[in-house]
Amino acid sequence: MRYNRQIILSEVGEKGQEKLGHAKVLIIGAGGLGAAILPYLTAAGIGEIGIIDDDSIEITNLQRQVIYRNDAIGKSKASEAKEMALSLNPSIQINAITDTLNAKNAISLFEYYDIMVDATDNLHTKYLINDACVVTNKPFVYGSVFKFQGQVSVFNFQNGPTYRCLFPDETSNSENCVDAGVMGISVGIIGMFQASEVLKMLLGMGNVLSGKLLIYNMLTNEQQKFDLVKNNSISLSRLDFEKKYNTVLEISAKQALEHIDNPDVLFLDVRNEEELPEISLPNSIQFPLSDLEENLDQLDSNKMILVYCQTGIRSKKAVEILKKNQFLKVQSIAGGALKLQGVIANNAVSVL
Amino acid sequence: MLDVKYFGAVAEKTKVDGETLAISNLSLQELVDELEQKYDLSSLSYSIAVNQKMVQDTNSYMLMSNDVVALLPPFAGG
């Protein structure tokens, strides 16, 4: 009943509604753009929506971030946004993430969600979103506002152009709303364009704004589209990402165990010998973290080394040690031996 | 004759959204150099489109009469 008015559209139908119900969308930023995008995606029945922001609501936000009530000043944006969304549509799941998006959490978050929606207010995070979308092969719904104008595009959609193809110069600086000023309606319009692109991608209808930059001017009502050119020389692997953002990336236990029979992969256990559970893998070796540096000569630097400890903390330190010593292909297994054991127990992989 | 359109922070500097210039037969880079000097745009970063299509190699792109050039800076607000 709730979705009747869109289900009766032939472009949507019951099948389309089901697609929306199975989709997971991450909205990065719960400011002006996020406040426009969230209620419409919520109302349309996107099955699971993540909203990430570590800010609290300030009185100067309310002129454009219209989902927040005056009495919520001082409260967490992500939490308030979640409460608003669930009161609008309690049949979906909303994940409030009170954190900033950073190089450490971006990859695992992006691996979980299907579509990333940029509702941020700074260029640095837009490059991070772009790069993490490229690494995880997910579409990036870009939206941004300057005074009375807004830009919208969908990057990295089906191998289409990315944000770096359009704006390769990362050192540029551009003012945000705090510095430049903005009308609430401008961010509302641009956020609505973004929400529309999300629904079009999920429903497979219309033309997704991939390979195009749309610019809307609220004062003149002029709307223009520019054709983007894919720059194939800009590519980014997981290792490039790690180097660029100086971070240690993790691999999930499930993904790690897919390499169980791979002769080019070595599993390195950095726990002490007595630690349980015992994980017996054919291509594995054990050195406690404290002894790792003196045993480096026993590791083959040509192999991809997947490091684990009990929970995934010591293994990150081990990865740092290995990288310092010119081992370039190393990753830490998130959740460590406990996660590995869980995956093995669930018969997700067969251990010989 | 060339049409040039300005957006965002670039339009703030030029104080107009666009203009028609009585020039042609020059490269896109030569036009950009001229505009940078005229409006002091060197502190800004922007991408360039001709006839609604982004152009990366501005040096080898020769402009023709009636071309429409757009200077597109990234926006950051949200």
Image: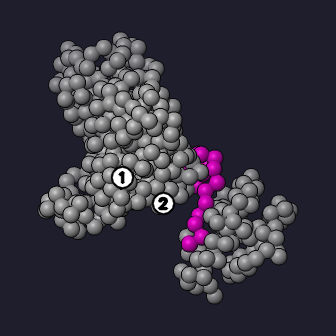
Amino acid type at mark 1: Ser
Q: CA distance from mark 2 to mark 1?
A: 28 Å
Residue at 35% of width from left, 37% of height from top?
A66
Q: What subunit carries mark 1?
A: A
- Where does label 2 land, which residue? A111
Q: How many marks?
A: 2
Residue at the farthest front position: A71
Q: Which residue is mark 1?
A: A87
**Local crowd size for mark 1, using a 10 Å CA cut-off: few (<14), some (14–19), many (≥20):** few
Residue A268 shows up from this direction: yes
Q: Are marks 2 and 1 in contact (CB under 8 Å)?
A: no
Near-viewer residue (B38 or A176): A176
Q: Is residue A164 above or below residue A343?
A: above
Residue A268 in picture, x, y percent from top left: 72, 70
- Residue B50: x %, y % from top left: 26, 31
How dense is the environment of label 2, judged by Cα within 10 Å: few (below 14), some, or many (20 and up)? some
In percent of width and height, residue A300 lies at 73, 68
